[in-house]
Image (cartoon, rainbow, N blue to C red):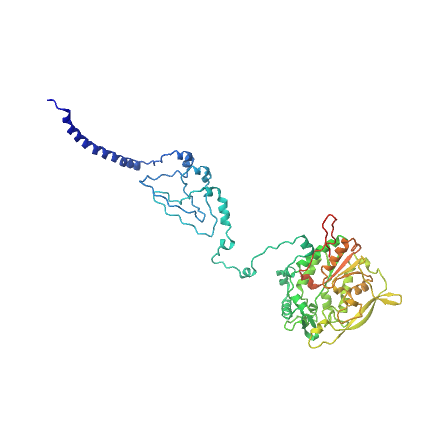
Amino acid sequence: MKRSPLSFLPLGLAVAAWLVPALGAAEAAKPESAAAAAAASAEPAKPKASGFRLFGKKKEKDPESAEPVKPAVAAEPVKPAVPAPAAVVKAEPEKPKGTGFRLFGKKEKDPKPAVETRAAAAPAVPVPAVPAAASTEPVKPKASGFRLFGKKKEKAAAEAVPAAAAEPAKPGVETPAAAVAAGPVVAEKKPGFFARLFGGRGGSGGGGETDKDAARRSAAEVAFLEECAALAAPGSTVTGRDGWLFSGSELSALAKAGGTGTAIGVMADYAAQVRGLGCDVIVVPVPPKALVYPDKVVRKTKIPVKRKVVPRLDSSWAAALKALETRGMTTVDLLPVFLAHRGDKEGAPYTQTGNTWSPRGVQLAAEAVAAAVKRSRAAKVAGSVQGISAEPGSISYTGSLAAGANPAVKAETLALRNIGRISGEKVRSVSFSTSGGGLLLMGDSSILAWRESGNPAGSSGSFSSLADQVAAELQAIPDVLSVPGDGRNAPRLRIMRERTSGRGTLSGTKAIVWVIPMTDLASAAWQQVPLQLSFSLDQPEIMLR
């Protein structure tokens, strides 16, 4: 019996209705089977290489980056953005996935981290927790174009932090109080040519007192200087024991004296210049009155006088004289001479009412200077003239310090010897000049004190200055270059001007006797002065003063 094809239509529809659900279930089961097979396999599945990864194969072959890849998950969590850490990350971070831009960053193979910051004071930035599927090592931030080429800029910026903020105070370490009081250390600026030539070195007190200066001082010297500082007042008169008067300015200069380095350096420089001319330098510092009579100044401090001998209280000045000796100069130390003769019946080295040495002190100094000259290159000048005589005498004198004393001070009588040159039947005063003789006395007004117009206020009619006394001791007439108030620089500047203008100053001089107050050795007002200046018409005009 034949059936029509339409009769099979219901049967086909029934089979199709059964097969469609079965095939769908089989397709759904395939991913689960593949995932199970991948989990059971020991070989981790490598991610499929894309065309973009083609240029990054070398990075995938890096042994440090060949770590097992965790089984793929349905959706890999997105890593949070990590800011650049402020401290140096010492742990080796995970290499980021290569990109086309990283093609030019091959230097990342260097084991050192690509990004380092130098802000030591900044705390380390904690790295956010990484999901279990990712590596537990800290994540290295992705390098940007600016970071790739701008490493040095970031390093310089980190190091440019102000010093006060960059170095925090360490716990348990205290800053010394002396360092805080002293303040910041300022580098000394070296003076220029003209500053060295005419302006000295500067610096208060010639560079300040050193630790060695303080270590040399005895207990008596320290106590003496402290009382001088308490008594000192510039321009005042200090009334001491037994009618002795002292200058407040002198006591202040003693108490506040600084280092002597500036003076020693300048004097050594000038001595080296004149030695090139075949000339010696003899330095004669005139000691202050208070160092000769310290027991007359102070009232509270006990001066240790033994067998009527007063000790020296000038350790720093004595050291300065030794330093001058080591620099090739001869020094005449008058303090021990004055201390030994301070009680002579012939007269004291200083006046009671004035602040200058007495005619007797000048005579003692002249004897010491003459002995030094006879040991120098100028020894042959001794005896070069005849007829210089000395006539003893005395004068009545009231010093300038008496004007400020209370009660009124009586005039003192001073013994002296007037120096003159016999000319025929008369005795005339000795004439001095700068004619280029073998011996030159150079310095301040101490050279001509007790001579005519150079006589201290309150005296007249005497010819007993240092220049006169040296002439009598040597029987020779020295040249004299005396500038009141400045024996340090003014005489040397005058010599420079005269030599620059063509005069033969110092051409025949064999020794220079340089007389200055001892306290000038601690002065900062020293100038380096050449013997002469050399210039031509092609150069700008040089103004000489």
- Between 198 and 66, the one nearer to me in the picture: 198
Q: Is residue 268 above or below residue 461?
A: above
- Quadrant assignment, res 498: bottom right
Residue 267 place in picture, x, y as percent: 71, 57
Q: Looking at the figure, which quarter contains the C terminus? A: bottom right
Q: Looking at the figure, which quarter contains the N terminus? A: top left
- Between 184 and 287, the one nearer to me in the picture: 184
Q: Is residue 128 above or below residue 357?
A: above
Q: Residue farthest to the top?
A: 1
Q: Is residue 378 left or right of residue 64?
A: right
Q: Is residue 44 left or right of residue 370?
A: left
Residue 177 place in picture, x, y as percent: 53, 61
- Quadrant assignment, res 414: bottom right
Q: Which residue is painted at 50% across and 45% down in the image?
A: 152
Residue 205 place in picture, x, y as percent: 65, 61
Q: Residue farthest to the right?
A: 424
Residue 427 in view of the camera: yes
Residue 437 place in picture, x, y as percent: 81, 57
Q: Which residue is painted at 76% across and 56% down in the image?
A: 495
Q: Residue farthest to the left?
A: 1
Q: Is residue 38 above or below residue 374?
A: above
- Between 3 and 347, the one nearer to me in the picture: 3
Residue 278 in view of the camera: no
Q: How many marks?
A: 0
